Amino acid sequence: MELTDTHCHLQFDRLVSRTDEVLKNAQAASVTRFICVGTNVDDSQKAVDIAATHPNVWATVGAHPHGAKDFFEQENHTARLKDLLTKPKVVAVGEIGLDFYKNYSPKAEQEKLLRLQIEIGALTGLPFVFHIREAWDEFWPIVDSYQSASRRMRGVVHSFSAHPEQLDQTLARGLYVGLNGIMTFTGDKLQLEAAKLIPKNRLILETDAPFLAPTPHRGQPCEPKHIRDIAEFLAGLRGEQIEELASFSTKNARELFGI
């Protein structure tokens, strides 16, 4: 059995000092592939560096909506982002999107940054890793303005924790759905219902490590090894065998990211 963590932050402080140990622990839990996700220009560089020195790690490059204001205050960030997207083992643009829950950056700045990165990313042919929080109504018109019948955007809605309505919107655009430890502790029955409705050919697994440790590891730093706990929970929720879920979710990850 093989599992894939399609979204972790190995470059973040709680993991970076023990990367080899973290990856070894994950491999002991049958997690064999890892995508290290960038959230700004500087840590995207760190993600690229980690991928370069570990054979089963790949990287994404992008600027998170929380940092939109800071991004536009730095003159060289757009050029650096474009350059990083050309590096070996970079498999996606992300994570990018809108977050109107915390609003760490003004909405207008977030929307400007999302559009910029879609336009830059479209030139690379890479898929996108989307972060959407309390911003579905504003997100879709932006994405749809770059879609056409002949050009469909490839990507995943990361950390999906919405309802069947938002799932339908996601699937209608041909996007994948990333589930993580939130599913193990949410009290929202509609979130769980949506998780059960995701087609097998659209589901991928992620941890968002070091965040969102699943039950029974709440309060601890999340690690890629916890994909196993997430997979076991989802298999039970969806009425599937864990081996089956591992097989199709890993196949989906390989097809989307080319890993």
Image (cartoon, rainbow, N blue to C red):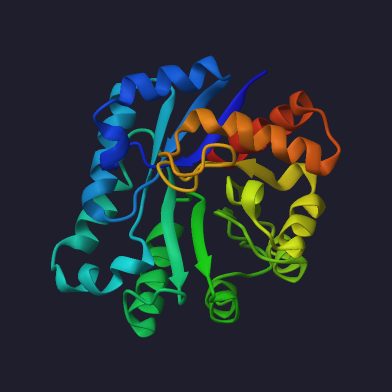
Is 212 placed above or below 18 here? Answer: below
Q: At 53% from the left edge and 35% from the top edge, which residue is drawn?
A: 5
**Left or right of residue 108: residue 97:** right
Residue at image point 37% right, 68% down: 65
Residue situated in front as seen by the camera: 56 or 19? 19
| Residue at image coords 72%, 27% | 247
Q: Is residue 258 visible?
A: no
Q: Position of residue 82 (x, y in %)?
A: 28, 54
> Does residue 14 appear in this view?
yes
* 208 is higher (above) or lower (below) than 244: below
Residue 103 image-quadrant placement: bottom left
Residue 114 horizontal/vertical position (percent): 41, 70
Which residue is located at x 14 percent, y 67 percent?
74
Q: Foreground residue, 134 or 61?
A: 134
In the picture, the quarter occupied by the N terminus is top right
Among the 4 quarters of the image, the one containing residue 134: bottom right
Q: Position of residue 90 (x, y in %)?
A: 38, 39
In the image: residue 234, left or right of residue 39: right
Residue 9: where, in percent of width, then height? 37, 42
Residue at the outermost right position? 239
In this picture, is 204 found above or below 75? above
Looking at this view, is 124 or 132 the one in front?
Answer: 132
The residue lying furthest to the left in this view is 75
Q: In the image, is residue 21 above or below residue 198? A: above
User: Position of 9 compared to 168: left or right?
Assistant: left
Q: How many marks?
A: 0
